Image: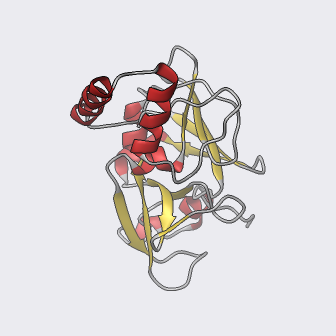
Amino acid sequence: MRRHGGGLFLADEAGAASERDTEDGILTRILRRRKWRPIGRISFILLCLAAGNLLSPVMAGASSEWLTISGKVKSEQGLIYYTPGDMAASPATEITTSSPWTTGKTVFRGVLLRDVLANVAASGKVLKVSAADGYTVEIPVSDAEKYDVIIAYKMNGEWLKPGDYGPFWIIYPYNSQKELAQEKYYARSLWQVTKIVVD
């Protein structure tokens, strides 16, 4: 079996985002470029909190620390991307499970795949998920609807690092249902995820 794992943010034209971007740091850069007054900053933060989700689609260049989502999604630019920091700003889900790639029980923290798909208004039936090295697997959207699949950004409290398992890893709750502890679902658990195309 092949080795596989798996807000609001506006990027500078030539800038690369850190996986540990905080909401405050992101807002500071936005405000600096826009030259907003302090009262505008406060209002904007309250608006973001009221929305309940700081993730938003933007156009961007490629980065090994970003997850890009394209295809049948709702975006005027046709491309949506998230950094680990963006994901961490969204409601998190933790899965404690054993896996073929880890020893004993491991705690994975991430965002439910179905929540990410809902956030980008995905309308396809299949996800073509690619790793940094170009390796691609297909995941039925029905998996995200039926199981608590997450896009993990932390393992045992540590950020997933590019070049290891990061920036993102598709994780199923393998121990929660016996049917998930089989090769079909292990093969869909891609690590080093950097791209999802909704088809």
The image quadrant of residue 168 is: bottom right
Give whichever of 119, 149 is nearer the camera: 119
Coloration mode? secondary structure
> Does the rendering let one see residue 199?
no
Across and down, in percent, residue 11 comes to 58, 31
Is 116 displayed left or right of 33 in the figure? left
Residue at the right extreme, as displayed: 133
Is 103 displayed left or right of 14 in the figure? left
Q: Quadrant of the C terminus?
A: top right
Across and down, in percent, residue 94 comes to 36, 64
Residue at (42, 51) in percent of width and height: 88
The image quadrant of residue 77 is: top right
Give whichever of 150, 7 is nearer the camera: 7
Across and down, in percent, residue 145 comes to 36, 44
Q: Is residue 158 above or below residue 37?
A: below
> Does the rendering let one see residue 121?
yes
Residue at the bottom extreme, as displayed: 104
Give whichever of 121, 65 is nearer the camera: 65
Residue at (23, 32) in percent of width and height: 46
Residue at the top extreme, as displayed: 76
Q: Is residue 9 above or below residue 24?
A: above
Residue at (73, 67) in percent of width and height: 1
Is 144 displayed left or right of 14 in the figure? left
Q: Is residue 23 above or below residue 154?
A: above
Q: Is residue 138 above or below residue 6?
A: above
